[in-house]
Amino acid sequence: MVDERLQINGETHAVRVRHSRRRTLGLYLSASGDIEVRAPHRYPRHLIRRFLESRRDWLARSLQKIARLPPPLSWQHGGRCPLLGEPLTLDVVSHGQLGVWREGRSLRVCLAGGDAVPDRIERLVREWFRRQARPIFEQAIAAWWPRLGLADNRYPTLKLRAMRRRWGSCASHGGINLNLWLLGAPRDCIDYVVVHELCHLREFNHGPGFYHLMDQLQPDWRPREKRLREHERLYPLA
């Protein structure tokens, strides 16, 4: 549902407004150019509009930057598939043992005689990513966990999901979900997402206390977040 419309660079852009239990307004621009405002419940509509107007120049610059970036990955032979920030090339072959493996700067996808349809290629790569991601993500959690100062019985369980709109989330019971496609991002971006979700174990919101904790644990989290946003355009959230 479109909640607002904003003229940017001579074009009309739809803006989605999402309400939650947050305390402040937030503006989010996806890798595909979708604009979203997140606002506290019952926040006045005219103030949301004023907030959007004040960010028009930033949105204009950001949308122009997105337009100049390379196209996102397509699931076909020759497509680009980042892994830990390194661009690999999909090498899709029909014959041989079914599976996926890395060969230098290529990611070999063997279909074992099956059709080279994008859905099949994506499914094989996704399952390979799932197997590779778990030990790397668990290592990152283990490295940052001691800095939180929480009791051992609160150590989070990890679930891997192929999420469409976010890189990670923290459940109210203390579990952490990480997007398996996060494995495509540079390691410093992976650490940023891990720290973000771990901080929610102490601050289950995005209030001042949460950001103060982020600053304590990872003082350079803002440039890490920026690099992750740039990476989103190169890798599909799916």
Image (cartoon, rainbow, N blue to C red):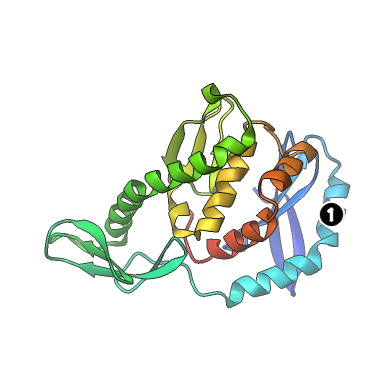
Q: Is residue 238 left or right of residue 103?
A: right
Which amino acid lies under the numbered mark 1 shown in the image of this protein? Phe
Q: Is residue 203 visible?
A: yes
On the image, the x and y values in percent for residue 54 come to: 85, 61
Q: Quadrant of residue 50?
A: bottom right
Query: What residue is disc 1 on?
Result: 51
What's the residue at 88%, 48% (across, down)?
A: 47
- Above or below, 128 against 141 in this view is below
Q: In this view, does 30 lie to the left or right of 6?
A: left
What's the residue at 72%, 39% (across, down)?
A: 210
On the image, the x and y values in percent for residue 27 come to: 73, 53
What's the residue at 59%, 51% (across, down)?
A: 192
Q: What element carries label 1?
A: helix
What's the residue at 47%, 62% (across, down)?
A: 235
Judge by depth and name the residue closer to the eye, 104 or 28: 104
On the image, the x and y values in percent for residue 25 come to: 79, 46
Q: In this view, does 91 lie to the left or right of 129?
A: left
Farthest residue toward the top?
153
On the image, the x and y values in percent for residue 11 come to: 71, 71
- Above or below, 64 against 44 in this view is below
